[in-house]
DNA sequence: TGTTAGCACTCCAACGCATCGAGTGCTAAC
DNA sequence: GTTAGCACTCGATGCGTTGGAGTGCTAACA
């Protein structure tokens, strides 16, 4: 990326800032007044011509002003956003008792974030991948069904009904429970693979028919994780932006938000590499690598509940979204999220003392 | 409702049928050709005037044709729809292993139905209300947490992490488990109220502090049922209908579909009274009693998984939705749904024999 | 050499206007 | 009771005009 001389940067910044607010192409005269450069509109025009040649801005047609190109937005996000000195605005409604069911919490968070930003939001359930197994419990339901409950380090719970073909007696079940717990507890989900399960099957011995059914089911629950669910909220916010509505991308976007496959791809991307822990990711237009989303921008962040329980959250809006605010909200959310658990512990501590 | 003379009914029917297809106001000449009444457009005009006076149709403006009023649709739904002789079209993709997690299944069903009908769909999780408790299990997680798992008659599972302030030993936990199971198993959710829980607290005796926390949590899980979740799909189908899009009701509708509160109200209505078991319910326009939905129609049905496990499913579309098809799809769905479990049993039976 | 004023040019958006056609309501004749 | 005919209404469509915002270029200025 070529370096821009100072004045061009200021002008580009002004154009984008203005366009973010209004959504209308911005002209040279506006900039001439808006900035304190004290340059006439004519001079600005010359600079704008340059900026257009360099690909940072686009003129929709001859006699309109200019709007930022994807490259322009990218430059803005990378260089022009001034980090607000993170005064942690209170997301007061975000008081979550961590005992509540995870899916409710996620839905709530998505909703709050949407209300806060006025864009569409999405959030994945936390991935158990790196989490350690705390315990497994199989219980009798009736002759044909066994219930398996699996709890991991962050106190996340998965359960699943297992169909069996012949009843299992209490003794067998107890043995199985002990077997599972002694051999799996403490391992991270990642470490439990088909090999582990196969080894377990060996040990289990005679009743391998039923037991293998059960073990398969357990394995499935553990790895079920792969098809992680995505919760969305505020999809209708998309309809507030005329440029999306008219071009018909609003429809496409809503479609994308509904089927969730593409969202998953984008959200997961940030989860894979843990190098840049605290970074937010910004996708502008085609950078999302999704056709349906080529008219919008997406900002994602990962959140961490501790104990390796991590998920990912994102915001979808028009390209002219208020990046500063969105990024700030996400940072903020992440902090709050992390604090939730600690606060819960704290609460208990205090009560004990009194 | 006044009785309509035969010819008027035919004309009304023709108007509505035509409007359902085209979405455009229909004029007298069209009807004159469309029907085999062999009446001239002038005669039809006279009849149409009458129908308008009676409130069955509306003319959007002087020189347009007529469109059905809510009352017109109502008459159509009540009297004019010919039940297709229920040839059960194969909803082949609807092969559900009933071991899959309930929320996934519901989401899938909503999706299929949306794809099938081209309208927006919604479905509630089954209500446990009339269901009997099968068993409850409390297990140790760590010093501060106890996991409660509750299974009901239809093999539906609820679980919840309970925060406790001081550890509970194994013996206490065992006692508590026995207590809960002996006193609650076999009761229907409806029968378990605060009184029951209070009585239990009495019996529990000394450790009432922790135990009451736990019992409260259990009570909460059981009654959690009240805020039943609604899954939706195909919301974007709404955008396919220009009359909604232009009037701006599409936006409102999408909003309604998102926040789900209103949907719940409508869906639940059918669940409360179990008198008219098999009936579908049709809400036209304001009959939904929701402002945001006054430009659309809703058709709902209840489904029954046996053992008193019931939920409710609905379709949201423009007033000119294809009522026949929608109602047929819902009927069909209900049958398939009921059959799912039976089929699952069957599968097991067969395997045992071989 | 960079900046600016001035001017011609472009193009969209808005407006007014005429036209068209679908559809109505009414009347008179069958 | 039915129908043909006719005047009338009113939205949709298309078209030319106008206005304004904004550009690009050129020539003059510092």
Image (cartoon, coloured by chain):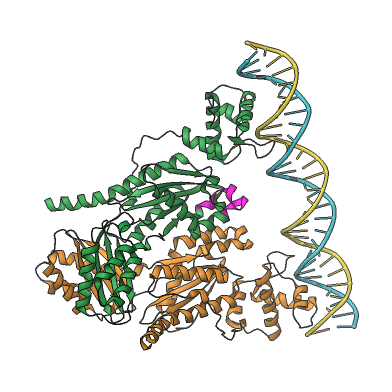
Chain colours: A green, B orange, C cyan, D yellow
Query: Is residue A248 found inside the magenta-colored segment of the image?
Result: yes
| Magenta stretch, overall SS | helix
Residue shown at the point (73%, 65%) measured from the top left: B62
Relative image position of residue D3 (x, y in whole percent): 84, 79
Q: Is residue A312 left or right of residue C16?
A: left
Q: Is residue B285 visible?
A: no
**Image spot of residue A16 (x, y percent):** 54, 35
Could you say where residue A55 lies in the image, as x and y percent from the top left? 60, 34
Provide the residue span drawn in magenta. Answer: A237-251
When asked about the image quadrant of residue A129, the answer is bottom left
Instruction: Give the camera-side residue of A207 and A161.
Output: A207
Q: Is residue B211 magenta?
A: no
Q: Residue at x 34, y 64 (%)?
A: A194
- Of A253 and A195, nearer the camera is A195
Front residue of A153/B163: it is A153
Count all numbered tags in the image, as a single digit: 0
């Amino acid at each position: 990326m070529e370096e821009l001389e100072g004045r061009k940067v200021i002008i580009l910044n002004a154009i984008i800032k203005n366009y973010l607010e209004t959504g209308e192409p911005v002209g040279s005269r506006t900039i001439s007044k808006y900035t304190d450069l004290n340059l006439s509109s004519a001079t600005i025009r010359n600079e704008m011509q340059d900026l257009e040649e360099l690909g940072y801005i686009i003129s929709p047609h001859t006699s309109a002003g200019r709007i930022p190109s994807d490259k322009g937005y990218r430059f803005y996000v990378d260089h022009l956003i001034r980090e607000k000195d993170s005064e942690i605005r209170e997301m007061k409604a975000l008081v979550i008792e961590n005992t509540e069911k995870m899916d409710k919490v996620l839905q709530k968070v998505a909703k709050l974030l949407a209300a806060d930003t006025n864009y569409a939001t999405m959030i994945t359930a936390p991935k158990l991948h790196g989490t350690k197994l705390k315990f497994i419990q199989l219980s009798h339901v009736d002759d044909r069904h066994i219930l398996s409950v699996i709890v991991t380090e962050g106190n996340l719970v998965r359960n699943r009904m297992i169909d069996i073909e012949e009843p299992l007696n209490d003794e067998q079940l107890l043995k199985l429970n002990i077997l599972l717990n002694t051999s799996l507890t403490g391992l991270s989900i990642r470490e439990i693979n088909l090999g582990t399960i196969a080894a377990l099957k060996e040990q289990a011995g005679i009743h391998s028919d039923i037991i293998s059914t059960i073990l398969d089911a357990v394995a499935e629950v553990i790895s079920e994780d792969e098809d992680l669910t995505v919760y969305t909220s505020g999809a209708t916010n998309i309809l507030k932006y005329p440029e999306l509505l008219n071009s018909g991308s609003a429809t496409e976007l809503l479609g994308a938000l509904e089927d969730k496959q593409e969202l998953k791809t984008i959200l997961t991307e940030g989860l894979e590499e843990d190098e840049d822990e605290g970074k937010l990711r910004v996708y502008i237009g085609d950078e999302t690598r999704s056709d349906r989303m080529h008219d919008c921008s997406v900002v994602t962040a990962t959140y961490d509940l501790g104990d390796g329980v991590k998920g990912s959250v994102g915001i979808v809006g028009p390209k002219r979204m208020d990046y500063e605010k969105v990024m700030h909200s996400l940072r903020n959310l992440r902090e709050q999220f992390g604090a939730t658990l600690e606060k819960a512990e704290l609460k208990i501590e205090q009560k004990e003392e009194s």
